[in-house]
Structure formats: structure tokens, C-alpha cells
Image: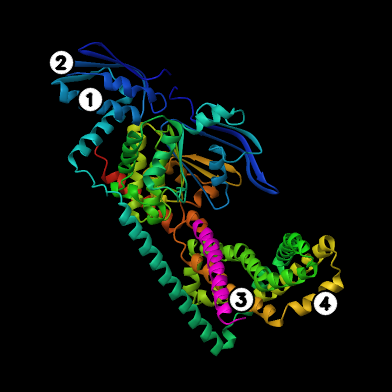
Amino acid sequence: MSAAAIDQATPGTLTLSGAWTGREIGGISAQLEAVNGAGQPKLLLDGAGIEGLDTAGAWLLQKLLIRLRTESTDVELRGLPPAFANLFDAVGQHLGHLAEVTEIPVEAPDTRLVSVGRHAAAAFEQGLAMLSFVGEYSIAFAGSLAHPARFRWRPILYNIRSAGFDALPIVGLLSFLLGIVVAYQGADQLRQYGANIFVADLVGLSMLREFAPLMTAIIIAGRSGSAYAAQIGTMAVTEEIDAMRTIGIAPLELLVLPKIIALLITLPLLTVFADVLGVFGGMIMAKAQLGVGYSEFFERFVKAVSVTAYLIGICKAPVFAVIIATVGCFQGFRTKGGADSVGRQTTRSVVQATFMVIVADALFSVAFSALDL
Amino acid sequence: MSNAAPVIEISKLSTSFGAHVVHVALDLEIRRAEIFAIIGGSGSGKSTLLREMILLQQPNSGSISVLGNDLNHLSEADTLALRQRWGVMFQHGGLFGALTIKENIGLPLREHTELADALIDDIADWKLAMTGLAPEVGALYPTELSGGMLKRASLARALALDPELLFLDEPTAGLDPESAGEVDDLVRKLRDQFGLTIVMITHDLDLLWQVADRVAVLADGKVQGVGSMLELSASDNPAIQKFFAGPRGRAAQQQQTAGRSSSKPK
């Protein structure tokens, strides 16, 4: 089939040819615009050469006729193959009908101020919703405390395994590498002052107080927080959550509380594990780069790092755990619609959890320095 | 493109999943501009057959020819060209959740033609109107639609490229009687006005009696019988009789025969 064409051989006659179909009609708009019926008493369109016609072609042709009728009083289309008549008339009817109905008003796009306002309102609404979510599960938790039989141990244990035990390799490896990096970065500076032994202070304090809890929380936010959001989000989309409610199982008790409790237990334990491997990494680096032996390192480590420093690191972990589990579950429950929304909420859960973990860590630093710890 | 040539020709088609045999040397022929329905019990291989016809699945052996193209020997380019000549309406819509209804309908046009955006929007609006949806629906997302509206929107997308052949998977399942009746009318209108060939899988007895020209009954991996509902109802094959026995089957049949006798002006 050849491309659609329109040719104004004489001012009063137009010859149409080729396939007037979506695929062949792409280049015709310039030709259509060139057609001019102004001042012609009679316009004759010859459609006998049309080889194919689909909705797009019929549409353009009808539009052309409508335009020509405003320019000339007598416009006639002749010779259109009868096979296309049905479609051509159907499009014509629809266009005639369209001319009668009034346009649907198009909403004007938001101005910048309005869109800033909308974003702020949405953020505020989300903050309130998260607060009410925390309130709801706190009530559920209190209810479970009053009736311990309502705790669901099986999901709790399952979550401890999936979020805790299964995460040991990745948490261990990354803390080990972080310990190596910290010791390596410090080695150069310490060697200049002959203060090699202080590498134990550097690695010990930084790992135990800051890096181990923070790294562990960020890994778990990416690993488990996203899984919570995706799981609950998919369940919301497939109406599993609604089904749960109608059967009389509170989704908060089955889906949220076990996750929060499991993470409250596992995140401090993972932090301890990260402490051990981080310091171990630092020790290896201290021996290789600074010639500080293991026994010397330990001797100094015990003096340099107080139990308080260790506990400060550990006590952050439960807070991070609550943040990660809350954000993950909350974003999961906010999933509405389809697959697209699940992906969006999962991303949001990771970004927000990581953000809030770091903000919380900063607040801890401020609080501890105010308390002189 | 003579009217006599079948649109779809299936011969000696065999399919099995592991030890589970779905089709055994199945033959079927679908003619131009007819409304053809495939029925059969659950697991009789209707959906598999449909998926094989629209190139989503490969049979183990046998040949399928659609619009004169043998599906076993298709080049990449031919496959693409063939896919633009048919439209498929999936059972659950298959609309893209990230796009509005209007964008969903316009997608095939944007993908395969060089039409101006404004024209594509106009065409999408028309297809929307054709399937009986209000213009406001175009701006909504699939998740905001009810089941019946989703099916119509899906049908509108299947019609976007003016296909010659339309596959409908359970077009009326889950619809209220009124919407189902409108789908009946729409299917008939598409065939009468535009000469579309329509292949559908359905369990809807009303749709079968009122709309389908010919019906194929699938059972035990084979086509047990092909013909109009009236012809099939006279068959004594037990696999076919299943569909006409029972109160629902009888009610639909009575309604149809009553409708025929009262509304036959000619």
C-alpha cells in the first residue's frame, strides 16, 4: 500500500489516493494544510483512489470536509469505495455529535505556589497519618500485653529469622570492611605523631558508638523495611488485608506487631555482631599497617572504650528498629491501586526509613553531648 | 482477501504441559466476519488455545494460521505486523496502571503510527465513546474504575488500531446484566458495521445464544462440535449436552427461542 496523498490538481478538484491508515498517513498533515478551498463555488473531492481507510484516516478526512465546508458552499466527496462507507459515516456522526456537546473544561495546571502548597499539605497529611498509625499499633500492642495469648509467636520467630539471622552475613561483612576502612584512614595520621596505639581508641569508639548501629540500621532498612512495605502493599492491592479484616483478624496484630517486636529483638543483636566484626577488621588493619599486635590492641581497647560507649551504641538500635518497621509497614498500608503503587511505596519506605534513622542518630548525638556522655 | 478464506485455521494442534495433555490433534476453522465462541469446562484448554492464537504461547506440534500467516514460520517483522492487525481484550483488562485510560487507549497508536498527539487523543476519545464510556473516564487511572468499566476500556484499547480480528477473553464475566447486555450489542455492532472477525471465550449463555454465530465446544483436548447454538443443542454428544442441560442452560435457551419467535418481523 502506498502512502496517503491529497492533490489539488485544479482549484476546484482534489484527488485523494493511497492508504489513509494510521501507519501511512504520518506525512500528510502538510499536504492537508496546503489544501485551500477559499473562494471556490464548488469543490469536488475524488476518493476513488483511496486504497485503505481506518479511524485515523476517516478522522482526518472528515475534519478536512468540515474545514472545506466553512470555506466553500458546495463540497462533495465522490467515489469513496463502498467498503469504507460504514467507518467513514460513523466517524462523521461522532464528529457531528462532538460539535454539539460543549467542551469538557480542562483544569488549568497548578501554579508553582499552589503546587508547593499541595506538597506541603500532602506531607502534613502523611505525618498525621503516620502518627495515627503509631497510635493504632501502640494500642494493639498494649492490648496484646494485657492478653499475652494474643501475641503471635510464629510470625515473630519467622521475622527474627528472616530479618536477623539471614542478615548476619551481609551485616558482618560490611562492618568488617568498615572497620578496615576506619583503621586504614586513621593509620596515616596516627603514624605521623607516633600515636599508633591510639588506633584502638579510634576504631573502638567510632565503631561501637556510631558506625555499627548506623550501618546495621541502614542495611536492615534496605533489606527488611523494603520487604515489609512490598509485602503489605501487595496484600493491600490483592484485597488480602480486607479479607483478613472480614475474617476477624486484626492486620496490625498479624502483620505489624510481629515485625516490630522481631526487629526490636534482632537489631540490637545485629549491632553487637557488627561491633565485634568491625573491631576485628580494625585490629587486622592495625597489625598490618601500624604494627600494633592483637594483645596490645586489646589492652588499649579495654582502657579506651568504656561500657557506656558500648551501651550508647546498643541503645540506639531499638529506636532505629521501631523507625524501620513503622515506616515499612506504614508505607505498605498506604499502597493503593496497582503494581506501580507497590513499587512507589517500597521506594518511599526505604528513603524515609534511612532518612529518619540518620536524623534520629543526629538527635542522639546532640542529646548525648548535652548529657556529657 | 476473499470472504471464503478462513481467518484462522488450526490443524492437528497438540499441546501438553509435562504429562498434562491439553490439546490432541485439534482442528478448527474460523471464517471472516463471524462471531465465534469457544466454550468448554475449566481446564479444557480454551485459554491455552487463545494464547496460542495470539502468539503468547507455542503449541507442541501442529499449525495455526492467522490472517493467512502461518504462526510457526513468522519473521520478527511479520510478527509485529500481524500483532497490529488484531486486538486482544484480556479477562482482567490488562490495562497499564501507570497510564490513564486515554493514554492506555492511545498507546498502540503512539507506538506504531506517526500521528499527531491531538489526533491520537481524538481517536482515543472516540474509541472510548464507542465502548459506551463517558469522556471523563479517559482521565482516570485503571484502579479508579469498576470491573465493567475496565472491560470496556480494555476493549477500547484493543480497538485502537482498527484491527481486523478481535479476541475477547470472557468479555462479560463479572459484569452486571445490563453491562453484559451492552457488551452483546457492542460485539454485534462491531461485526455488522466494520466487518470484524470476533473470537471469544465465554461461559455466558446469553452471550452465546444472542450473539455468537458459531460455537466450538472443547473437551478432552478436541473440538467436540462446531455449529450454531441451535445446532449444538440438538447434538447428543454428552460433552456438548452438558452445556444445555441444567436450569441455567434451559432458561437461556427458552429465552432465546421465545425472543426469536416474538421479534421476527420478516
Can residue A325 be seen here? The reply is: no
Distance of mark 1 from mark 3, alpha carbons? Answer: 75 Å
Asked whether, in this view, residue B113 is left or right of residue A297, the answer is left
Q: Which residues are magenta?
A: A344-373
**Nearer the observer, disc 3 or disc 4?**
4
Assign a secondary structure to mark 3.
Answer: helix
Q: Is residue B190 above or below residue B21?
A: above
Distance of mark 2 from mark 4, alpha carbons? Answer: 105 Å
**Nearer the observer, disc 2 or disc 3?**
3
Q: Which residue is mark 4?
A: A299
**Nearer the observer, disc 1 or disc 3?**
3
| Residue A337 place in picture, x, y as percent | 44, 58
Assign a secondary structure to mark 4.
Answer: helix
The residue that appears at 41% across and 41% down in the rendered structure is B157
Q: Which residue is mark 2?
A: A40
Q: Earlier in the sequence, mark 1 or mark 2?
A: 2
Distance of mark 2 from mark 3, alpha carbons? Answer: 86 Å
Assign a secondary structure to mark 1.
Answer: helix
On whether disc 4 and disc 1 are found on a single subunit, the reply is yes
